[in-house]
Image (tube, rainbow, N blue to C red):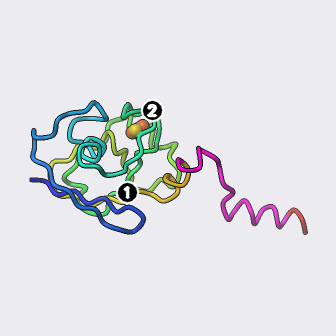
Amino acid sequence: MPKVTFIVDGAPHTVEFEHGGLPYSHHGKPESFLDVAKNLDVPLEHACGGSCACTTCHVIIKEGAQHLSEMEDDEADRLDTAWGLTTASRLGCQAVISGDVVCELPMYTRNYVQEGGGIQLGKSDKRKTEEVVR
Ligand code: FES
């Protein structure tokens, strides 16, 4: 049984699922992070319902990347638009899990969604503003 750990606000939530044992709920690919999260009550955002059309399901893989499906072109193209993209980033609705894996939910995605999609100025923007003022 694959063990999936979601790190949410710094706290790990570990769940297990049996291959073929999740009642597929049409949220992302079957046995993807989103499918597992939806079935086991982990709060993973999914504004587009798991159709690879947003980046709110962005997860950063900490361990077990070898236990995930290969990234397809549409996932890579969509990920390019994600805030805080890393080389370990995946879309939770597209990455299908075949073994133990640990992922972290990026804080800025959660803030972005919780605040209704508002954009906050980052440090670099603030510094630019200060330079202009001087
Ligand atoms: S839920 Fe929108 S891309 Fe995954």
Q: Quadrant of residue 134?
A: bottom right
- Identified at 36% across, 35% down, the residue is 50
**Front one among 92 and 36:** 36
Residue 39 magenta-drawn? no
Identity of the residue furthest to the right in this view? 134
Q: Is residue 79 left or right of residue 95?
A: right
**Vertical relation: 89 (above or below) 69:** below
Residue that numbered label 2 is attached to: 53
For marks 2 and 1, the one nearer the N-term is 2
Would you call the spot at circle 1 few (<14 residues within 10 Å), some (14-19), or many (20 or more)? Answer: many
- Identified at 24% across, 43% down, the residue is 39
- Identified at 15% across, 40% down, the residue is 22
**Vertical relation: 80 (above or below) 23:** below
- Identified at 75% across, 66% down, the residue is 127
Q: Which mark is residue 60?
A: 1
Residue 119 magenta-drawn? yes
Mark 2 sits near ligand 1, with its Cβ under 8 Å away: yes
Specify whether residue 70 is in view: no
* Magenta residues (range): 113-131
